Image (spheres, rainbow, N blue to C red):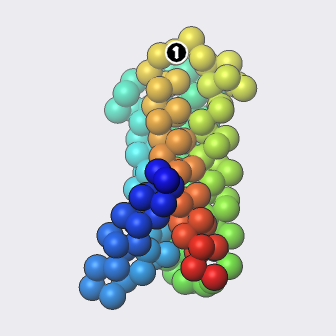
Amino acid sequence: MVLQILVFNLESAGRVMGKEVSDMYWVTGILGLLLVFAPFLVDYSQNPAALFISLSAGVLVIAVSALEALRHESERWEYWVALILGVGVLLSPFVFGFGAHFEAVWSTFILGALIAISAGAILYINSYRR
């Protein structure tokens, strides 16, 4: 039920001025940009593991979002990459051992979840339309 409401809201929001919801690569790009700047804004840049994860995953999310913006192809593999990166960022505090750093944990957890949810929603909507 909640997923159906999310799909309806994304579809209705994505049909503004003829744009389809599948062109929401900019959402993942902005979230990737936030992930790049999070270590400096939230002040966990002194933690090398958290800094590396935020910078590398953020740059990769921005890259696949920019690639989707330039190519506009129907395969949507870029969203699969963003989904996997989002889940990886979500789990990274526990895998790479910076779970004791409160700011790093919550920043990566929230941004990773948002990236995974936005990419997963686009993939779900595209499979729902077929």
Give the quarter of the image for residue 64.
bottom right
Identify the residue shown where x is 42% and y is 81%. 20
Give the quarter of the image for residue 10.
bottom left
| Residue in front for this viewpoint, 122 or 45 | 122
Q: Residue furthest top?
A: 100
Residue 111 drawn above or below residue 22: above
Identify the element where label 1 is drawn.
loop
Identify the residue shown where x is 39% and y is 24%. 43
Q: Which residue is mark 1?
A: 101
Give the residue type at disc 1: His
Residue 48 lies, in percent from the top left, at 60, 25
Residue 34 drawn above or below residue 42: below
Identify the residue shown where x is 68% and y is 79%. 75
Identify the residue shown where x is 63% and y is 82%. 130
Residue 98 drawn above or below residue 71: above
Does any portion of residue 28 appear in the rendered image?
no
Q: Residue furthest left?
A: 17
| Residue in front for this viewpoint, 92 or 7 | 7
Q: Residue furthest front?
A: 1
